[in-house]
Image (tube, helix red, strand yellow):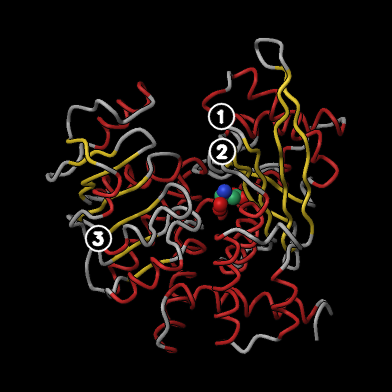
């Protein structure tokens, strides 16, 4: 599809897929189907602003593949959102859900908007209009959105309400990542960050080490980065640095994470925090830490800064944070990179648990959710690790290979390829 597949993230994602497809001798027909999304929906989202003017925003939902089950993936509000990026992120969801052995396909959505410039009322209106436009294509059995960059459990609550209003009855299973009061799952808020920490523990376990005392730098302090910091800190890791859009901060003794979280929740910025030194984002990436977790946007570790990275373990909390060039540079430096489709899978795993709980009207407590999440993350990591050891391959190629083999098997059984 022209225009849809042009961006760097799309090209990189498909290149990774084709590389792993060669190694697993995947059929050409499977590659051909996975190279293009099934459907791309583009909508206009008009919003009456607080000053009574009308602004029209561009909205997207790309449904990549549903051979394993209903489409599933987040909704992103960010000023850089474009069709090609959403398509790449949708493909990554297909690969992620397959790798994690979930009965779900892959999709992603987004609106090109800077959400920090909107009032609460404007954001609610934007969300309701967007849902109305994509309503024919979503639903608990069709396509189930969730939070992503710039959206939250509140966004999901509005989506659920709008979709239910249009259908005439309450449909809690239409979105995941909702507040627990209206059908959300215990543990969903922290799930992606917690999954990142489980993966860090697994990597260290392979090196016969524990997370206690290990030094970590985290890029991003949103839904993923903040919870990764909280959970790793609880286990005794030393979080030396974190960053947000305004600032990066560093304390060589380790940050006081609980105090920092209180500060951040109050000020909505890391800037001005007294317990650390302000540094630049590139300085954060180059810190002498054992683990680096990029948990912000795609392309943040790139050919301009990869040479400076000193960490020997990178765990991709964001989707697509390491570019193809940076990947090569880091590989040459013997850095072990756990790719996004494995490392940040905790979010969609607990989204799946939420969807199951909504459908069955039976809710689990947080301990159950965490135990089940750990089981899925550990099992998926082991599968990828074993494949990489057996075939002397890096984790990115191995994760993609394991994912593709399941997708190909399902396509064959359903008669989509032969
Ligand atoms: N946006 C998250 C991701 O990229 C979660 C998706 C979901 O829960 O459906 O994995």
Q: Which numbered disc flags the more N-terminal residue, 3 or 2?
A: 2
Q: Secondary structure at mark 2?
A: strand
The residue singled out by tag 2 in the image is 78
Q: Decide: few, some or many residues near mark 1? Use Cα within 10 Å; few <14, some 14-19, many ≥20.
A: some
Q: Quadrant of residue 272?
A: top left
Q: Quadrant of residue 279?
A: top left
Locate residue 123, reporting x and y percent. 63, 24
Q: Is mark 3 within 8 Å of ligand 1?
A: no
Give the answer, above or below, for where 65 lies relative to 284.
below
Nearest to viewer (mark 1 / mark 3): 3
Give the answer, above or below, for where 206 lies relative to 356.
below
The residue singled out by tag 1 in the image is 115
Locate residue 283, reporting x and y percent. 24, 48
Locate residue 234, reporting x and y percent. 27, 45
Locate residue 278, reporting x and y percent. 21, 35
Mark 2 and mark 1: Cα distance apart in space? 7 Å
The residue singled out by tag 3 in the image is 308
């Amino acid at each position: 599809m022209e225009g849809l597949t042009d961006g760097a993230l799309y090209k990189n994602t498909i290149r990774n897929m084709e590389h792993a497809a060669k190694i697993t001798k995947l059929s050409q027909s499977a590659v051909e189907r996975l190279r293009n999304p099934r459907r791309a929906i583009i909508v206009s989202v008009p919003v009456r602003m607080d000053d009574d003017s009308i602004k029209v925003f561009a909205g997207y939902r790309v449904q990549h593949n549903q051979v394993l089950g209903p489409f599933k993936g987040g909704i992103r509000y960010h000023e850089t959102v474009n069709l090609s990026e959403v398509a790449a992120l949708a493909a990554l969801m297909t690969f992620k859900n397959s790798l994690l052995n979930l009965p779900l396909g892959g999709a992603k959505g987004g609106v090109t908007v800077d959400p920090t410039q909107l009032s609460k009322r404007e954001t609610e209106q934007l969300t309701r209009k967007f849902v109305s436009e994509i309503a024919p294509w979503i639903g608990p059995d069709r396509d189930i959105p969730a939070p992503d960059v710039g959206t939250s459990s509140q966004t999901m609550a509005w989506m659920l309400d709008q979709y239910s209003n249009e259908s005439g009855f309450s449909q809690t299973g239409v979105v995941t990542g909702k507040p627990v009061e209206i059908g959300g799952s215990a543990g969903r808020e922290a799930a992606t960050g917690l999954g990142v920490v489980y993966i860090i523990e697994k990597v260290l376990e392979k090196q016969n080490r524990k997370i206690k005392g290990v030094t970590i730098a985290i890029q991003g302090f949103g839904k993923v980065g903040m919870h990764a910091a909280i959970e790793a800190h609880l286990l005794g890791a030393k979080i030396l640095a974190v960053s947000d859009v305004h600032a990066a901060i560093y304390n060589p003794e380790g940050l006081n994470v609980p105090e920092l979280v209180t500060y951040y929740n109050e000020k909505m910025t890391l800037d001005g925090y007294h317990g650390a030194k302000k540094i630049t984002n590139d300085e954060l990436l180059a810190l002498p830490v054992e683990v680096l977790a990029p948990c912000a946007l795609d392309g943040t570790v790139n050919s301009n800064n990869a040479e400076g990275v000193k960490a020997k373990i990178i765990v991709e909390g964001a989707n697509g944070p390491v570019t193809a060039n940076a990947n090569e540079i880091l590989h040459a430096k013997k850095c072990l990179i756990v790719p996004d489709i494995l490392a940040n899978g905790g979010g969609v795993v607990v989204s799946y648990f939420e969807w199951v709980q909504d459908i069955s009207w039976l809710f689990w407590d947080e301990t159950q959710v965490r135990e089940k999440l750990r089981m899925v993350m550990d099992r998926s990591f082991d599968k990828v690790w074993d494949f990489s050891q057996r075939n002397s391959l890096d984790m990115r190629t191995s994760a993609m290979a394991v994912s593709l083999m399941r997708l190909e098997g399902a396509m064959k059984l359903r008669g989509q390829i032969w």
